[in-house]
Amino acid sequence: MKQVFVVLVMAAAVAACSPKGDPNNFTVSGKIEHAPSPNVYLEQVGYDNTGLKVVDSGKIAADGSYSLKAVAKEQNLYLLTVDHKSFAVFANDANDIKISTDLDRTFREPYISNSDATKGIYDFLHTFRAKDSVLAGTYQKMDSLYKLNPNDSSIILLQTDGAKVMTSLVDYMKDYTKKTNSPAAVFYALNIAASKNAMNLEEIDTLVGDAMLRFKDHSGLAAFKSQLKIAIAANAAKQNGGAEGPYPLLNQQAPALTLNDVNGKPVSVSSFKGKYVLVDFWASWCAPCRAENPNVVAAFNKFKNKNFTIVGVSLDTDKAAWLSAIKDDGLVWNQVSSLKENGSDEVAAYQFTGIPFNVLLDPTGKIIAQSLHGPALEAKLAEVLQ
């Protein structure tokens, strides 16, 4: 989760100081004054922790004007950047969004027109920064007093004040995510909350679940929730003695896992005992997973006749997208998924922190390797399948 959190906080730092038309095909344009470079980019933020993806690029004209276009199947979060340094964040809730700014200004909040969701994001940012600034000032005073005299009674009063500000901040963020009409704004606000440790992952997970009830067909929020579930499971594993670094289940029997295949038939990982099995966790919306799939296909074709098979476990919630990705990527082995918004507890039992992820089981069902990607996958299979 960390990668997206950092991206959004950076975007907020540099930017600080009702749907119209067809947002699926949108243009963002305006003027950028005093740009250090003519290279302007439109970059999409991944709901699934895949970072930024450039969806269009262009040149800033001599008069500062620019225009960028993109196609989106739903409302997403985007950054406008000059040489990949962000100066604005926005949501595509309209088909003709106007964003202008002067990069010479110290507080260069952009001028926004025709995007209610984006204006809402900046309203949130104003309030958040104001409360966060008070909180930071309180903690700074506490730190200064503690260095002079750890027993100063004023420290306790400041702690009380800080707790009240933090409660107010958290209440504001929760209220904002419950009232906004923008799924992209929900994602933005909750990423900020996580990056600042204002709320724990369980609280954020609950708020995303509430938002998904309002934005039922939004696959991005579903992807975000799947990543949260993985992170929550990983945290729980660590608190229960899971190891940092090495995979905590290495050299242990694989957790039970039975999910439905593409035809709705239950398939259990344990049913493949007697073979080496790669349990491959992925999703159609996960760009790194899709990039890794050709390597998995090559490994399967090379070793499928040597007592080896694969069980693909998807974190998808959209069955059509899942089936399409299986076909497009040529994944001919067993594929299973719970297709649940909240994911599967059986999947969470595997205690990984992100996808793509896989584990290799020996014929007894014991996990003998994990995170085998690229050449490492073929190398490990060549080692054990002699």
Image (cartoon, rainbow, N blue to C red):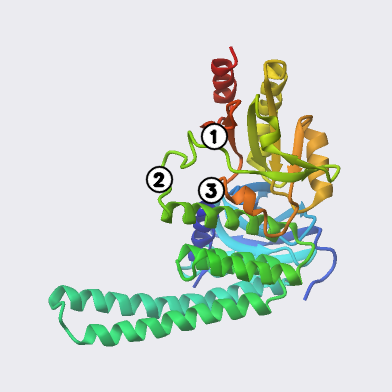
Q: Which residue is mark 3?
A: 353
Amino acid at dot 2: Glu
Which element carries disc 1, helix, strand or loop? loop
Residue 265, placed above or below residue 378:
below
Which element carries disc 3, helix, strand or loop? loop
What crowding class fits label 3: few (fewer than 14 Cα within 10 Å), some (14-19), or many (20 or more)? Answer: some
State how many labels appear. 3
Query: As drawn, is 9 to the left or to the right of 89?
Result: left
Q: CA distance from mark 1 to mark 2?
A: 15 Å
Q: Choose the circle earlier in sequence order: 1 or 2.
A: 2
Q: Quadrant of residue 210?
A: bottom right
At a point 58% along the width and 25% down the height, the residue shown is 377
Amino acid at dot 1: Ser
Q: CA distance from mark 3 to mark 2?
A: 12 Å
Q: Which residue is mark 1?
A: 371
Q: Choose the circle earlier in sequence order: 3 or 2.
A: 2
